[in-house]
Image (cartoon, helix red, strand yellow):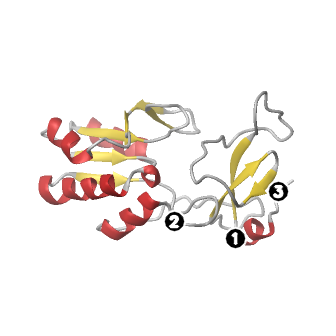
Amino acid sequence: MALQIHHNLASRELYGLLLTKLDREGSQVTSRLGVAAEAIEVEPDLDIHRLALDHWPLHYLVCDEVQFYTVEQCDQIARCVDELAVDVFAFGLITDFRGLLFDGTKRMLEVADERVPMQVEARCWCGSRATHNARIVNGTITYEGETVVVGDTAVADGEQPLFGDVVRYELLCRRHYTRGELGS
């Protein structure tokens, strides 16, 4: 959705920036469908309001993986809207693998003018609406550990790591997340 909005606005000759943090492919926004676009990597010390001023005039910001942004960066995004009249489209997960709000998400929910759920609902392996992003380490759901561990969503079961653990994420309904049940 972030890529689509950025493309649509840019094709209307509007000028904007695409930002991301911890995308699995680095300084770009990628889609599992194979589409990608170069993006500005949001480092912890990046002042997004200053970035917008440095690229003025600016019509929009598309912010991907906003759950990983700092609270200060979320406030800077709000300043872009309030002081510069820049449209902002922010995308990210609501909760982490433990079912807790990310700091960036929490702040975005607090300062956002509106929240629009994605039109395409994610589904658990059982067909129910997926509400949890489970972290699977070596084939088992884990509920403890660092909040941010970048993994893959497409690691094949049984794949053996060369070094360390195989970490992947799977969308699950609350029932299967709570029970620790993965589809076969």
Q: Nearer the viewer, mark 3 or mark 2?
A: 2
> Contact, CB < 8 Å: mark 3 with mark 1?
no
Query: Does residue 141 lie above or below 61 as drawn?
Result: below
Question: For the residue marked with disc 3, what is the amino acid?
Answer: Gly
Q: In this view, does 155 lie above or below 105?
A: above
Q: Which residue is drawn at 74% across and 51% down?
A: 136
Q: What residue type is labelled 1?
A: Arg
| Residue that badge 2 annotates | 101
Residue that badge 3 annotates: 183
Please state if 87 lies on the left or on the right of 65 as rendered: left
Distance between the Cα atoms at labels 3 and 2? 25 Å
| Residue 52 point in image, percent of width and height | 20, 42
User: Mark 1 or 2 closer to N-term?
Assistant: 2
Report x, y in % for residue 177. 73, 65
- Structural crowding at the residue carrying mark 1, measured as other residues with C-alpha within 10 Å and reported as few (<14), some (14–19) or many (≥20): some
Q: How far across and how far down the image is residue 26, in percent? A: 49, 31
